[in-house]
Image (cartoon, rainbow, N blue to C red):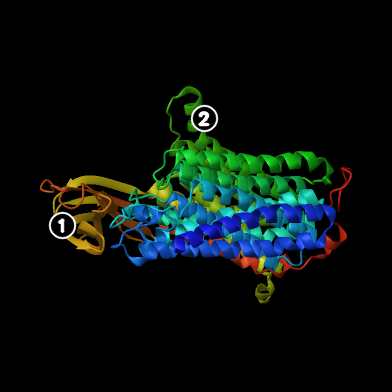
């Protein structure tokens, strides 16, 4: 009975979403207040219905109700409770339902927290959210029904993919989806603004908290995914430019550009066109990510729940919504007032350069990810684009971006002169040269030293900007707005991230060999000695593992436990790496050769890694997300400032004007 009520809730949610997508939109055109107010009630009702549907599916998994096909395919009675819950979204149908639920929750949040918005703008934004919900709910109901019954009912289920049986997967997809789907608010606000005839500084202030929120959660999701893949997939790396990794990175890059574009529109009434296009593009890239992950059109080590046929439907939804939004922009773009004056030396110019680098990086990753698919479609030839391409093209742009990030915040908004900063730049330059010299002494890598030098440049520039804003007085630090601290932490985290990546790139060492107990590998001065093999059974899997003693100069450093697991229900073998993270270097080891029951008389494969800086990569990424949450506490995101009241940018006759 519970699955049927869940399915009824989905059908009702679709009906509500259809009305939400049509009635408020018509009401805003006809100036019917009651019709526009309906958007608020519809958004909340749709969220309630989808909460019920998702809760019903979760209960089905917890109760191991294998009369529901999805539970039978992705759950098992012997599975721990946490993995029964994780199994809800570790499949195509459940993950799309989670996607739609989060979309509805964002609509409800706009309704509850957007009461200060003009009614017509809020109604139009909620109508767009309703249209998005209608499309994806129809997709769920007609092609991906999570409540489909299975007869005869099996005695037990097939269980969850062993690679997904990890605590990281309990939080990684929800965090990622909160980020992905959060950009739907930016998309809806952009479409509503074009319909409303209002793209201005006040609109930017309304939009900014939603974008920060989505960007912060997307950052968290990507970071947790990187950490999970590091130890669960056992490749000994934090990022491998895999297609599924790349498609989550694309909206992150575009979202970062959108954040800076919104800031410029809010402060200087510039970039109105750019901001609207980025708002549309960022969510479109998020939908592309959903399409790639669910369709399996690109081969990926992360592809766990793919269905090419249904992926085509997601592609159709993507093309429809993106095409409609871009068509509306083309129709209305001539009415957006432009600000023509842009001084070469100003903070605005710095942000222009910043955005150009970010968009260039986005295009670089997009082409590297989808070029093989294009060639395959045209010629049938299978090619791959790997890390060398991305490292060669992407890295120089990021170094240049870091150079701009250090200077741009120092500059004034309107017009400035670099001559005012000669002493500051000179002192920061000395700091950079010292960092490069020290890096050469330690690592003897010219490229690594230059990268660390630019990271030092960014830290110096950020601290100088903070010093100037406080007038050099520590007593004023506490009075700085939350947005300032968000800026400081985020920029310093980019520098730390750069240092971590550089250390990992130039300092990582590894070795692999077939070892018998008592034999060892030596990596970067550390000796990894294989101990006696042990076997046993835990929960829903069998394991074969070994302690690997790590020593340096005959002194014990740590002992790593690495194992292979065999899951009888799925008949799959997975590798669980052992690692000891530290602020200096992480020691990592993994074993191979088939798991329990395998012939290990000739030894087993052992891979040992020495990886400096990898912990700092993740610390920096978490700092970025934290910086976003801090920025959301800034009261200036809620209260209009003087510039916004005195100089709005509307949608008018299309006359080009300069707003000072």
Q: Position of residue 256 (x, y in %)?
A: 62, 52
Helix, strand or loop status at disc 2: helix
- Residue that lies at the very extreme toward the left in this rendered image: 601
Q: CA distance from mark 2 to mark 1?
A: 47 Å
- Residue that lies at the very extreme toward the bottom in this rendered image: 475
Report the residue at 59% width, 58% height from top: 12
Helix, strand or loop status at disc 1: strand
Can residue 488 be seen here?
A: no
Can residue 402 be seen here?
A: yes
List the residue tagged with mark 2: 374
Report the residue at 63% width, 64% height from top: 45
Q: Is residue 392 above or below residue 131?
A: above
Q: Quadrant of the N terminus?
A: bottom left
Q: Is residue 294 above or below residue 179?
A: above
Q: Nearer the viewer, residue 620 or 522?
A: 620
List the residue tagged with mark 1: 533
Q: On the picture, is 480 further left or further right than 158?
A: right
Label whose residue precedes the other's in the sequence (2 or 1): 2
**Neighbours of disc 1 within 10 Å: few (<14), some (14-19), many (20+):** some
């Amino acid at each position: 009975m519970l699955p049927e009520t869940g399915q009824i809730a989905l059908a009702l949610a679709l009906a509500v979403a259809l009305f939400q997508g049509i009635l408020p939109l018509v009401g805003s055109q006809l100036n019917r207040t009651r019709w526009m107010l309906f958007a608020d009630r519809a958004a909340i009702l749709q969220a309630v219905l989808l909460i019920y549907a998702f809760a019903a599916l979760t209960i089905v998994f917890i109760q191991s109700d294998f009369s529901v096909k999805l539970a039978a395919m992705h759950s098992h009675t012997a599975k721990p409770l946490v993995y029964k819950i994780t199994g809800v979204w570790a499949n195509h149908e459940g993950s799309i339902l989670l996607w739609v639920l989060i979309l509805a929750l964002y609509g409800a949040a706009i309704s509850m927290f957007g009461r200060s918005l003009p009614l017509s703008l809020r109604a139009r934004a909620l109508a767009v959210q309703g249209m998005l919900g209608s499309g994806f709910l129809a997709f769920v109901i007609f092609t991906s029904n999570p409540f489909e019954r299975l007869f005869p009912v099996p005695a037990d289920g097939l269980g969850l993919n062993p690679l997904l049986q990890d605590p990281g997967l309990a939080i990684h997809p929800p965090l990622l989806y909160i980020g992905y789907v959060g950009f739907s608010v930016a998309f809806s606000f952009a479409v509503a603004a074009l319909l409303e005839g209002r793209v201005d500084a006040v609109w930017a202030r309304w939009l900014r908290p939603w974008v920060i929120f989505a960007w912060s959660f997307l950052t968290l999701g990507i970071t947790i995914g990187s950490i999970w893949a590091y130890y669960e997939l056992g490749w000994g790396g934090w990022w491998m430019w895999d297609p599924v990794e790349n498609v989550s990175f694309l909206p992150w890059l575009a979202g970062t550009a959108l954040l800076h574009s919104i800031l410029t529109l809010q402060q200087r009434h510039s970039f109105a066109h750019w901001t609207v296009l980025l708002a549309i593009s960022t969510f479109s890239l998020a939908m592309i990510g959903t399409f790639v992950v669910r369709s399996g059109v690109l081969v990926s080590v992360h592809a766990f729940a793919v269905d090419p046929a249904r992926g085509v439907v997601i592609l159709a939804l993507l093309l429809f919504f993106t095409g409609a939004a871009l068509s509306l922009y083309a129709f209305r773009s001539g009415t957006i007032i432009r600000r023509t004056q842009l001084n070469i030396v100003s903070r605005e110019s710095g942000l222009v350069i910043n955005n150009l680098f970010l968009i260039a990086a986005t295009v670089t990753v997009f082409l590297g990810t989808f070029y093989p698919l294009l060639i395959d479609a045209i010629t049938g030839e299978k090619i791959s684009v790997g890390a060398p391409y991305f490292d060669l093209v992407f890295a120089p742009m990021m170094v240049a971006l870091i150079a701009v990030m250090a200077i741009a915040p120092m500059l004034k908004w309107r017009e400035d002169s670099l001559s005012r900063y000669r002493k500051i730049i000179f002192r920061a330059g000395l700091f950079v040269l010292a960092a490069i010299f020290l890096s050469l002494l330690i690592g003897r890598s010219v490229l690594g030293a230059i990268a660390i030098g630019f990271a030092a440049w960014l830290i110096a520039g950020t601290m100088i900007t903070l010093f100037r804003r406080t007038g050099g007085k520590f007593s004023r630090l506490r009075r700085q707005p939350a947005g300032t601290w968000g800026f400081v932490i985020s920029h310093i985290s980019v520098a730390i991230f750069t240092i971590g990546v550089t250390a990992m790139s130039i300092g990582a060492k590894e070795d692999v060999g077939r070892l018998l107990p008592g034999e060892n590998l030596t990596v970067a001065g550390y000796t990894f000695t294989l101990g006696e093999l042990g076997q046993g059974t835990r929960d829903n899997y069998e394991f074969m593992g070994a302690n690997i003693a790590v020593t340096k100069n005959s002194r014990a450093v740590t002992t790593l436990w690495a194992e292979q697991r065999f899951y009888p229900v799925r008949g799959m073998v997975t590798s669980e790496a052992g690692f000891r993270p530290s602020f200096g270097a992480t020691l990592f080891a993994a074993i191979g050769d088939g798991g329990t029951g395998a012939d290990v008389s000739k030894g087993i494969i052992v891979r040992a890694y020495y990886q400096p800086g990898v912990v700092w990569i993740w610390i920096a990424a978490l700092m970025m997300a934290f910086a976003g949450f801090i920025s959301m506490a800034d009261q200036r995101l809620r209260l209009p400032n003087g510039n916004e009241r005195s100089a709005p940018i509307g949608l008018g006759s299309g006359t080009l004007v300069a707003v000072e």
